[in-house]
Amino acid sequence: MWAEGAGPRPLFGEDADEVVAAALAGDPQDLDRLVREYRLLRQIVDGARAGIALLDTDLRYLYVSPHMAVMNGLPGEALLGRTLNEVLPDVERPDEVLHEVLRDGRPRELLLEGRTLADSPYESRVWRGTYHRLEEDGRVLGLVGIGLEVSAPRQRQRELSRTNRRLLLLDTAAVRVGTTLDVDTTCRELTEFLVPGLADAASVELIPREGPGGELPDGGALRLRRVAVTSVRELAARVRALGAAGEDLHYQPGSAVRQCLESGEPWLGNFSSDEAFSRAAPSADRVSAYREAGIHSGVVVPLIAQDRPIGTLTLVRAGDSPAFGREDVVVARTLAERAAGSLAKAERFAREQGMALELQLALLSEPTFPHGDLEVASRYLPSGTGVLVGGDWFDCLALPGGRTLLVMGDVMGHGVEAAVAMSHYRSLIRALAASGHPPADVLCEADQVVFAGGLDRVATCLLVLVDHAAGTCVHASAGHLPAMVIGRGQDPFLAPVPVGPPLGTGFGGYEAASFALRPGCVLMLFTDGLVERRGEDIDASLRRLTGIPLPVGGALDEVIDTVLAALRVTDAEDDVTVLAARTAERPGPS
């Protein structure tokens, strides 16, 4: 590294001007050193894995290292005398920052992104560059730029970021989609979740199930019911015109939805021509409407539950939104798989609820036979909150001696099992009442029979034995709310009664109480769904009930309607059952 006969002089340690001057003066050792330095410097620069370029004050290339030329995809001589923006317009570079380096001399580090003419496996290339000012005798000559491609780590970072966003999206969907056991609500939650985060418009179409198994037709149009549709505000009117929630849509063979359902695989399309649009659309006459809406890209993913297709999820983008990519399809498919599971549960729930409701209504509609001196009216309202119908029941039984037994009961739980258990309780109470036992004994016998029989559903029950001739009522309660008495010239009140344990516990211990019932008074028996509200104390609810001004002389149905309207039972979280009875006026002396 040192010239022969010379001391240990560092290769690059001396002032360059002195070395050049000595070489020009004819010192062969210095000339040799200068040539060797130049060769080594070129070897360092040309062999560096970083791209190196010299720019003049107008940011034109003065020198380009071989690696920089490879990164740019152009030979070095094609770059000399031209700016980067002229040669490679697809690379973003903030020239104003480079001019600042020329002005103040402070180096800057920049991140450049774009594409060059060189082949690359990356959708967008990224370089990290450092720029320094070059000076000579106080005069600014230009800049030296050193750039290193960081496309690979940046792509890994993007992929990790996309993965994290996808996981976050799926985690959020888990708590926002499928919050109820209602098909329409679940579909609406899904479309609202996807817009505008993933799509400009989203819709869910389900296969009608009235046919044999809901099979897809071999030919002709496929009819689907649009259950939910959501769009950004700008598209709302146009999207509604193409099919609102609740409407039936017909899809031609070969359409995107048909392809998706028949293959069981997602469909992705970016519509570059009307011909492609016409093939994918439900029918060819919709193409112009889609074009007017600015729709240019679509994804259709199947909704599959228990290995059978139940419908599709369709996403579209319009206007300036980017076209859908494979990553979007993966996200949409994952969300659709989760939603399909929720929809399958909702469908099973709807079938079970329908069965339970039909069973319960059939049992409640069985004829009852009060004595002629007792007028009765009833009302049953299943919950509107999506909970399965419960085990409410009522009865009205004519007994010997002109007496009538009023029954109001509520089996714990919901669904078909509760409705079946209700039928057992109703039959049992009827049989025991026919034996002539007083109300407290009827409850005691029923409790023991149910407990011994192993029926796993307990029930509350209120029995009121009306003796019109004596003007008295005897009542007993198995964990049930008391009856309300509505009399002429007096405020409504709850008849006090000792409350025993629910039926089916085996504890027994029921007591009866009696009260006078004047002619023309109204008795109202009810289940807790009438009065119980979340966050409200039951005593406050009952005070609200007895505070309702009620007509006594009108029709009993009017009395029930007044109570239901005052308590707003449409907001009730449980089934509501009401039985009203009124004693006839006794004829005066002739």
Image (cartoon, rainbow, N blue to C red):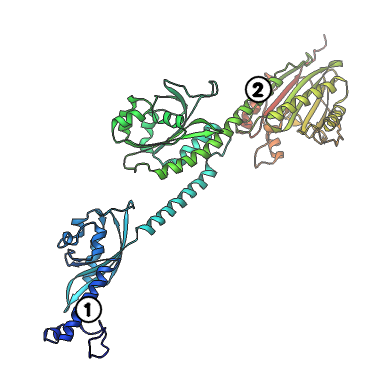
Residue 80 position, x and y percent, is: 16, 62
Residue at 48% x, 24% y: name it.
216
Q: Please give the name of the residue rendered at 28% of the width and 53% of the height, measured from the top-left corner.
A: 119
**Which residue occupies the foreground of this view, 75 or 153?**
75
What is the quadrant of the C terminus in the image?
top right
CA gap, disc 2 and disc 1? 98 Å
Q: Please give the label number shown on residue 268.
A: none
> Which-is-in-front pick, marks 2 and 1?
1
Residue designated by label 1: 37
Label 1 secondary element:
helix
- Quarter of the rendering containing residue 142: bottom left
Q: Is residue 543 above or below residue 429?
A: below
Q: Residue furthest left?
A: 25
Q: Quadrant where the N terminus lies?
A: bottom left
Q: Position of residue 553 (x, y in %)?
A: 70, 19
Task: Using residue 1 as the reference point, say whether residue 573 is left or right of it.
Answer: right
Residue flagged by tag 2: what amino acid is it? Glu
Q: What's the residue type where badge 1 is placed?
A: Glu
**Residue 123: x percent and y percent?**
33, 51
The residue that disc 2 covers is 358
- Residue 158 is situated, as x and y percent measured from the top left of the image, at 40, 54
Q: Nearer the viewer, residue 525 or 206?
A: 206
